[in-house]
Structure formats: C-alpha cells, structure tokens
Image: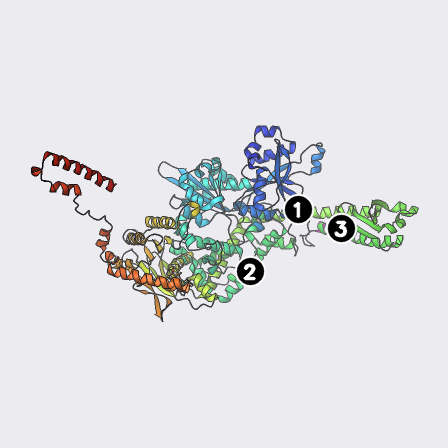
Amino acid sequence: MADNNRIKTEELISEESRASATPMMEQYIEIKAANPDLLLFYRMGDFYELFFDDAVEAARALSITLTKRGQHLGRDIPMCGVPVHAADDYLQKLIALGFRVAVCEQTEDPAEAKKRGGKSVVRRDVTRLVTAGTLTEEKLLAPGESNFLMALSRVKGEGETAYGLAWIDISTGVFRLCATSENRLAADIMRVEPRELIVSDALFADEKLRPVFDLLGRAVAPQPSVLFDSATAKDRLSRFFEVATLDGFGRFSRPELSAAAAAVAYVEKTQINERPALGIPEQDGGSGSMFIDPATRTNLELIRTMNGGRDGSLLKAVDRTVTSGGARLLCERLMSPLTAPEQVHRRLDSVAFFLGEVSLSAALRDHLKQLPDMPRALSRLALDRGGPRDLGSILKGLEAARAIADILKPASLPEELAAALEALAALPEDLEAQLAATLADELPLLKRDGGFVREGADERLDDARGLRDTSRRVIAGLQAQYAEETGVKALKIKHNNMLGYFIEVTSGNSKALTEGDEAKAKFIHRQTMANAMRFTTAELADLESRIANAAGEALTIELATFETLRQAVVASAEQLKDGALALSVLDVSAGFALLAEAEAYCRPAVDDTTAFEIEGGRHPVVEQALARQSAGPFVANDCTLSPESGDKGRLWLLTGPNMGGKSTFLRQNALIAILAQTGAYVPATKAHIGIVDRLFSRVGASDDLARGRSTFMVEMVETAAILNQAGPRSLVILDEIGRGTATFDGLSIAWAAVEHLHDVNCCRGLFATHFHELTALSEKLPRLVNATMRVKEWKGEVVFLHEVGPGAADRSYGIQVARLAGLPSAVVKRAKNVLARLEDADRKNPASSLIDDLPLFQASMRAPEPEPHTSQVETMLNDLKPDDMTPREALDALYALKRKMQDDISIED
Ligand SMILES: Nc1ncnc2c1ncn2[C@@H]1O[C@H](COP(=O)(O)OP(=O)(O)OP(=O)(O)O)[C@@H](O)[C@H]1O
C-alpha cells in the first residue's frame, strides 16, 4: 500500500471520515480519536485486531503479516492481528520498543448486541492502557527491577524556576517525590531510571530540556498540560488517597505536588476504573543522596554495563539477595548512595549484625528464598487483575514473614532491623488464617474456572461440588448400563461444548438404538457423523443440567469467595507493603553480610570529614572476574586523597603504561565510595571515607553520533560539566583527558584541567594520563601527588605489576602492548623505528622543555612577536638618490616603485 495514499490518524478521525463510516467503523473511529497516540488493540472474537496506521506500525514492529479488510474513504484498510491468548508476548515486544497500547475489549455478549437488531455492533470499550511505566503483569515485568513511571513538572515562581519529580511503581505501590533544579534534573531522573517519563506538552517543547529528554528517548510521553495543573494538584491527590488534607503525608512544594498529581492522574488514566494500591507519597531527598550525573552513572557501569547487560556491572558483582523485592531495593540503594553519615551507619550496623550471626543469617535466607513477590501480587489484586496464585503469594509471604519474625525476636537487633521486625510483627494474622483456611494447596492461575477453594472451607460449595461429582459418576455408570441394554459394547458417553453429554455408537451399531419401540422412545437422535451416530436420553439430559447447575453454583460461590479474600488483602495493603519492604531490607543486609564474608570486604568508616583513605582497595567487578577465570589474584592498592590540613583534598596524577591498571584503579576508588555510602562493606582492608556529595567521572571513550557528537566532543562536554560543578566535597575521576585530539591540544587541555581542579574545584580526585609532561605540575601545585602503575621489563618484555606507587612513569610501553595485542610484527618493528627517531628529535628539540618551566609553557601559548621587517619597496626607496637623477630617471623609478608595491600586495594576498 503506497505510503502517501494511506489514511493517517488525523484524516481518519475527521468529520468527513466519520460521516461515511459503517457502524463498526464509527465505533472504531470514536475509540481511536480518544487514544490517538496509542496503538489500538481492537477485540474481535479471539483476536486483537489493529487497523490503519496502527496495523502498519505494529506489523513492522512485530514482524507479522499485514493484510487488508475492506475499504474506507475509497481506500484499503490495512489490518493485522494477534491472538488474544498470546497477546502478552506481543505487548511485551511493543512496550519494549517504546509503543503504548490501548486494549479495547467487547463489553457485552455478541448475543446481546444481536437482540438490539441485526446491524447492531457489539459494545466495546478501552479497558486499559498498557504503557511501559504502568505495567503489572508478571510476564511483562523483570522480577528484580523496579518499573517506575515518573512525572516531571516545572513551576515558574517570582524568583527561580522550580522543578518537581514524582515516581510511582504501580507493580509494587512505591510512590516517591522530590524537588529538583535544572542542574540536578538529569542526574535525579537517571538515578531512578524511569521506564516512562511524562511531561506537559509545554515542557516537552522547551529546547533547553531537550538533552534531558534525549537521554530517555521514546520513554518520554508528553501529556496535556492540565494534568500538571498545580492549582488542582492537592485536590486530586486528596481525592485519590481519600483524605481531607495532605498534611499528614508531609510538606510538599508546589512542583512536587504538581508532579505527584500528574503521576496519579496518568495512572488513573491508564488503569481506567481500577485503583492501584499506592503507598502514600514519600519524600525522597534528592539532595540527601550522592549526586551522580548520568554520564558518570553510565561510565561506572553501576547497574548495567555500557553494552546494556547486567553481567559485569557493580550491581551484579555485589548482589547476593534472594528475593525480587530485595534485588529491587539493592538496585535502588546503589543508584542513590546516602550523604548522611548516621543513615549510612544505620545500614552498616545491620550488615555487621548478620556478619556476627552466621546461623541466624543462614536460617533467614532459607526462609527468604521461599518468599514470593508479595508487592506485585498485591498490586495485581488491588487492580482486580490478580488470580488465585496472587492470593497464594500473599499467604506464603505472610507465613514466611511470621517464621522470619520468630527467628529475629530473640536477637538483640540494631535500629534498622528492629524497625523491620516491628513491621513484620504488625502483619495481619487474621488475614493469614483466613487465606490458609480457604485456599487450596494447588492453585490455578486464573479464577475463571474455579478450583482454588479448599474442601471443607465452605459447606455450600462442598455440597454443590458433591452433587456435580456424583452426577459425573452416575453418567459413567449410565454408559455401562446402556451398553448392557443395547448390547453395543463399544457404546460411549462423551462430552463436547456443542452437544454437551451425548451417547455415541458407530453407524454399524446404530440400529440397536433406532429400531424397536423401546429404543426409539429412549434414545433421541442428535447428530449423524460419517461413521457414527449420536444420541441423548431424558436421563442424560437431566443429569447434564444437574451437573451444569451444580458447577455453576460452585463457581459462583468460589468467585464470591475470591472477591471476599481480595477485599481482605486490599484492606491490609499498607501493612503488607511495609512488611514486604522490611523483608527486602533484611534480604539486602544479609546479602551484604554474605558478600563481605565471602569476598573479604571491610566495614568503612564514614563521617563528615573530607578524608579518603583506602588501604588494600580492590575493584569489586574485576576482582571477581579474575577469580572466575583463575587469572591470578587481584593486586590491592592504597589510595590517599585526604587533605593534609583544612578541607581541600588531594589530587593524584596517575601515569603508567597502557594496560597497567590505571582505569581499574580509578574506578575502584569511585565504586568503593559508592558502596560505602550505600551502606555496604567495601573491597579493601581499611577504608575511611568523608562523605562524597558529588561523584564525577570521565572514563572510557564513547561517541554519541546519534546526538551529533564526536568522541572528543563528548569528552569535552563531560569534562566541562565536571570542572563547572565539582566542589570541595566531590570526588572526581578523570581518565586520559585530552587524548582524543592533537598531542599539544590535548596536553594543554589536560594541563589546564588539572590546575582548575586543584585551584578552583579543590576536590579530591584521581587523574590518569599518558602525558608524562604533566607530572612536572606537582612541583607547582602543593596538593598534587604523582603516582604511577609499576611495571618491570624483563628480557625486552613488559610485565605489568598492577601496583600503584609514588612517582611518575617514564614511558607508556604502547608498542609492547600493541605487540601483545597481535599487531603484525612488521608494523611493530616500524613503529619502534619511528619512536626512536621521534624520541631522538625530541631530545634535540624537546617539547617538554617548554613545560619544564611553567611560566615558559604559558608564554609558549602566546603568539610569537613579529620579526622587524623591511620591505623591498623601502629598500628601493632608501637606495634612490634624487639629486643625481634626471627627470626621466626619476619618473622611471616612480613607476618601478609602483610596480613593486603591486607585486608585494598580490604576494601577501
Ligand atoms: N590491580 C590489578 N590486579 C590485577 N589485575 C589488574 C589490576 N588492575 C588491572 N588489572 C588487569 O589489567 C587490565 C588492564 O587494566 P586497565 O584497563 O585498568 O589498564 P589501563 O592502565 O587503564 O590501560 P590503558 O591505558 O590502555 O587504558 C584489566 O582488564 C585487568 O584484567
């Protein structure tokens, strides 16, 4: 179908299009007009069908066949469809690709529609919107990952413009908000990693914020500005939480309220009539967590590597949790390390407790392993999307929680764990008893067919089931009886959905049932098949209706029981959520203890100073990778950036060969700071860390061609952000600044950056470089310390020791590394030759001599003074002796001078 001839959504929903639509098309257009930006899954029998542009886009995205179905406005209607039973898989794919889907169901029985007249269309309505940030289905969610919908709002006051963020995970009920500023915006958003970010249309159009939105790509969903109206925000929230005032929740700023109300409005919009069990909004002090800008987060591979996978990330290396809730909490904590020492201590005390209680910890983890994902089950139940297994999950969770509380009760617990125990003790015992008494041992996924209420739980249900089962047994008996009576041994009683129960005999045997008065009176013919005939009897029909009635009654009772249990669970939502969070806290703390024990981590001393003292530090990811590959031990290294006096920390200038371990060392110190402030033990023998309020890193090279930035440009943008923002409490990690450009340009930039970090930012920092000339700076900058990765040369081979020591490297061993990497030997040989010549030339005319003296280096940056210069015209003029010339000679000389002038001008041009 030609693209330009297709009916686009705007045309489809126009007046003209509606006027010429068939009744069904009219219904479709109306629903599409209400959801123009979403793909419309339009239910038709056992399929969700997509039409027009939706069909074209979905067919391409899902690699399914695009067909046509009739015409509209004289043009073909493109169509594709997915079967209802497999819809989740397709939805998953579409959501992952950034689509949003409106699911439109038939809301009445087709028979009802028929009653209204031959041409009546079955009523349909959108029952939910499926968007990346509002998922609840187990299949569509990753178990150990949160699934946040975030709203961003901006309120322009008289003075400064203020921003607010609110984020909700409807699959767990978590609801948080924080105030933020333009500078922190990207960092605060990426700390949460929302799956979907909603912003007002106006904000979305603001070019200043474009780079922030670009970070999230298709996850940004612009919404009508009314959703963000701060004047009605309080009312909307009060209505949602059914409270008269929000005062009990805390004090929120206007932008926070506006974002929170928008998030709630969007949730209501996507869930249509169902109200999710959201927790009350909690302030999440953005300013109370370490500021880590998005580039640093990516560079340090905190929760995923540059390739997007979990393997190789910090999270993967330190995750010893055994529950989905624990994994989510760990991820959240790593993304937002704390900046208040007392809060860090609280968490560290929990880890210390489990380290000292090995058998208690093992018993706890055994119980935790059995724990289902309670918050997600709860959320599905609250949205009336849950099944019997979700009720079962709540029951199992309650049982595990009680067993865990019993283990913890006798112990003398630190503050955080004592609070967790309190939350477990507050879990509703009566709900547990009610669920245990009612639910069967084996539970079906869907409530639809019943079979989930245990025997003995409800007398009426047992009676109905008894009747149903007895009737089934009677039918089995009837088969034998009829076979006997008719003498047809092969007579069978079967069941199908069309006929219900029926008697079947082969055509050859049919006479026994059709001939003779008695037989004729008893066996009523129903159907003739190719090789068989089917009959029924009054007795069979009666039994069948008794079975149907009993089964119907049993199902009604079961569904009512389900609803009662569901209501009971939802009524206890708050306690259940608190209990689930408490279990996650236990899981994370016990996991950290296990990690510390297994990997020999130590408890860091964290305080309000600007100290940074690591003894025997290791890189958590590289260390485990080396161990897995049995590739020798990781070499531990110290790092001291503590100030000698005052607040200004030290800067290390790290030189060393390629492959020497510079990047590893830089990153490991940043990761140790993050782990410490997350409240975990750290891979070191000793660590003292004064709170790092902002962490910046510029490591590794990557380009961002999508945004039109070269590798060097990205490097400079990131460096600029660091030099503009780092303060005395910051930790800065810079790896090979300036390597992406010409040597002198790069060296100059690196030089100036070190000076700026030292004099202006005054932060603690590590600066790795191959510009060995920079080491001269330590003589001028008192807080700059030279350090180097040590290597040994042995029989012309370079041996990397991976040890950091004081001093400066004399060379980079780049050619040796290139040879190890398998560069052709001819190239290596030639490179050695070239290097020798370059070094020789440098000795004779050393570029570094410019740098030996700092003021000289600066002078070298100035343009050279112009040489005194005498032009040829001037020389000619000087040579002229007018007194000795005839008038003719004077005139010739004048012409000659003019000519010379002309020549000089054209040469200079
Ligand atoms: N402390 C260490 N102990 C053992 N092995 C290490 C250590 N540090 C680094 N390595 C190993 O050396 C490899 C190279 O380290 P790294 O990338 O940090 O070097 P580099 O000096 O930054 O190199 P380049 O200058 O080429 O970027 C790592 O992949 C790791 O396997």
* Lower sequence index among marks 1 and 2: 2
> Would you say residue 349 is visible in this rendering?
yes
Q: In this figure, which residue is indicated by the disc labeled 2? A: 369
Percent position of residue 163, x then y: 41, 41
Question: Viewer-proximal residue, 687 or 441?
Answer: 687
Left or right, 850 with respect to 108, comes to left
Task: Tell me which residue sits at (9%, 37%) in the image.
Answer: 885
Q: Is residue 526 magenta?
A: no
Percent position of residue 251, x then y: 42, 43
Q: Secondary structure at mark 1?
A: helix
Percent position of residue 711, x then y: 39, 50
Q: Main secondary structure of the magenta part?
A: loop
In front: label 3 or label 2: 2
Q: Secondary structure at mark 2?
A: helix
Residues at marks 1 and 2, CA–CA distance in whole angstroms: 32 Å
* Label 3 crowd (10 A; few <14 / some 14-19 / many >=20): many
Q: Is residue 448 magenta?
A: yes
Q: In this figure, which residue is indicated by the disc labeled 1? A: 560
Numbered circle sitting on residue 468:
3
Left or right, 740 with respect to 561, comes to left
Residues in magenta? Answer: 445-460
